[in-house]
Image: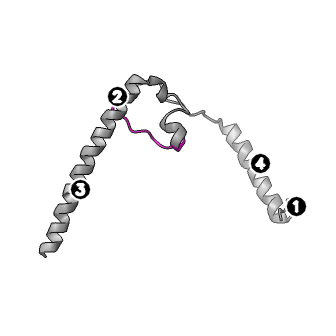
């Protein structure tokens, strides 16, 4: 039982240490971004290393108004796409589609 408690304490200390290190890294990243603001551009810095799909954690909040908006598809466009896809599936099921070897 004593060993179990010691393991829990050790993990708690590790978590505190990890949190402290993450804060240090975030502060360092903030200083770097302040010195080189062009690294925030899409395709540069962390985006280039790990891809634009991963979220970037930063110490400074991103300014409002820079959010990308989703394009809205009309109901007619959704219906056309749906019908085209259903036609493709029907063609594949009937064997009319091309098969890759």
- In this figure, which residue is indicated by the disc labeled 3? 14
The numbered mark, 4 or 2, whose residue comes first in the sequence reads 2
Mark 4–mark 2 distance (CA, rounded to whole Å): 51 Å
x then y, percent, for residue 71: 60, 33
Instruction: Point out the frontmost of discs 1 and 2.
Output: 2
The numbered mark, 1 or 2, whose residue comes first in the sequence reads 2
Instruction: Point out the frontmost of discs 4 and 2.
Output: 2
User: Looking at the image, do the residues carrying marks 4 and 1 touch, with CB atoms under 8 Å apart?
Assistant: no
User: SS at mark 4?
Assistant: helix
User: SS at mark 1?
Assistant: loop
Q: Is residue 3 magenta?
A: no
Mark 1–mark 2 distance (CA, rounded to whole Å): 60 Å
x then y, percent, for residue 83: 75, 49
Instruction: Point out the frontmost of discs 3 and 1.
Output: 3
- In this figure, which residue is indicated by the disc labeled 4? 84
Tell me if mark 2 has few (under 14), some (14-19) or many (20+) residues whose alpha carbon lies within 10 angstroms of its own: few
Mark 3–mark 1 distance (CA, rounded to whole Å): 61 Å
Q: Is residue 53 visible?
A: no
Q: Residue at x 85, y 65 (%)?
A: 95
Tell me if mark 4 has few (under 14), some (14-19) or many (20+) residues whose alpha carbon lies within 10 angstroms of its own: few
- In this figure, which residue is indicated by the disc labeled 1? 96
Considering depth in this image, is 94 or 27 the residue closer to the camera?
27
Mark 4–mark 1 distance (CA, rounded to whole Å): 15 Å
Q: Which residues are magenta?
A: 50-59
């Amino acid at each position: 039982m004593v060993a179990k408690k010691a393991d829990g304490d050790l993990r708690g200390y590790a978590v505190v240490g990890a949190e402290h290190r993450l804060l240090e890294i975030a502060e360092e990243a903030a200083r770097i971004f302040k010195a080189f603001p062009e690294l925030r551009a899409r395709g540069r810095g962390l985006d280039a290393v790990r891809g634009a799909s991963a979220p970037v954690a930063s110490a400074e909040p991103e300014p409002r108004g820079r959010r990308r908006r989703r394009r809205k598809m009309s109901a007619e466009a959704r219906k056309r796409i749906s019908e085209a896809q259903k036609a493709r599936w029907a063609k594949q099921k009937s064997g009319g589609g091309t098969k890759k070897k």
